[in-house]
Image: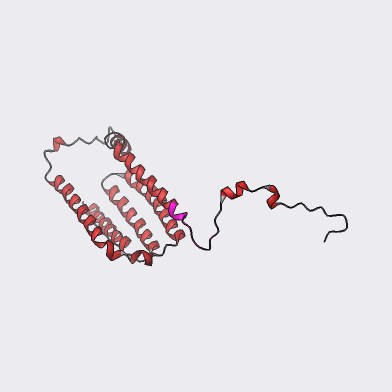
Amino acid sequence: MILPALAFYLFAAVLVLAGMLVITARNPVHSVLFLILAFFNAAGLFVLIGAEFVAMILVIVYVGAVAVLFLFVVMMLDINFQELRKGFLRYLPAGLAVGAALLAELGLVISGWVYAGPADSVRAAPTPESVGNAQALGDLLYTQYAFIFEASGLVLLVAMIGAIVLTLRSRKGVRRQVIADQLARRREDVVAVVKVQTGEGV
């Protein structure tokens, strides 16, 4: 019992520390690396509670794809973060209001868990012998939480479109490909056929 408790406190402490470093690091590349560290520790917490499938999905999807994608996007966009931080104080009240609202919602959720009714009112969890971890998760995800699952997919789609739009912004001194002009050009405008007589070449 001591070893799982120590592992929990270790993973939780590193996770909280990494989460704080994600938003406080000045270098955006370092922020993404701290985010990857936070994902690994969250996966460790999932393993401790017996959700191995969720832990592997967290490592494979978020660490292997999303976090690496964030890292490449941050490195390729060349965003001037000093310009973005200039308006920090202007939006600070709105950010504090949103943070307070999220904390209030989190407090309501935790209080609901603490002051919940009898245990028989909660849906009984399937036994590990009859239903596996992945099957139980799929049962909840595609039945009871199907709408939320589809909404999260829509949010990810919007985020992907936003990343594409950011990469397509116009910058001075950068030549871009204009596909319409390439398709509209004629052969005689770009190709010149010169007939050279024998012995008159260079």
Residue drawn at (17%, 49%), measured in percent from left and top?
Answer: 110
Q: Quadrant of residue 93?
A: bottom left
Q: Quadrant of residue 117?
A: top left
Whole-percent x, y for residue 94 in the image: 24, 58
Q: Is 82 positioned to the left or the right of 106 in the image?
A: right
Q: Residue at x 79, y 53 (%)?
A: 194
Residue occupying the point 36% across, 61% down: 31
Return the residue nearer the eye: 198 or 108: 198
Residue range of the region highlighted in magenta in the rendering: 165-175
Q: Quadrant of residue 14?
A: bottom left
Front-most of residues 84 and 62? 84
User: Mainly helix, strand or loop, the magenta region?
Assistant: loop
* 19 w.r.t. 128: above or below: below
Q: Give percent across and percent down for residue 35.
A: 34, 57
For this rendering, which residue is in front, 110 or 134? 110
Question: Is 8 situated above or below 80?
Answer: above
Measuring from the top left, give residue 38's x and y in whole percent.
32, 56
Q: Magenta stretch: residue 192 in it?
A: no
Of the 4 image quadrants, the one containing the C terminus is bottom right
- Vertical placement of 187 versus 29: above or below? above
Residue 113: x percent and y percent?
16, 45
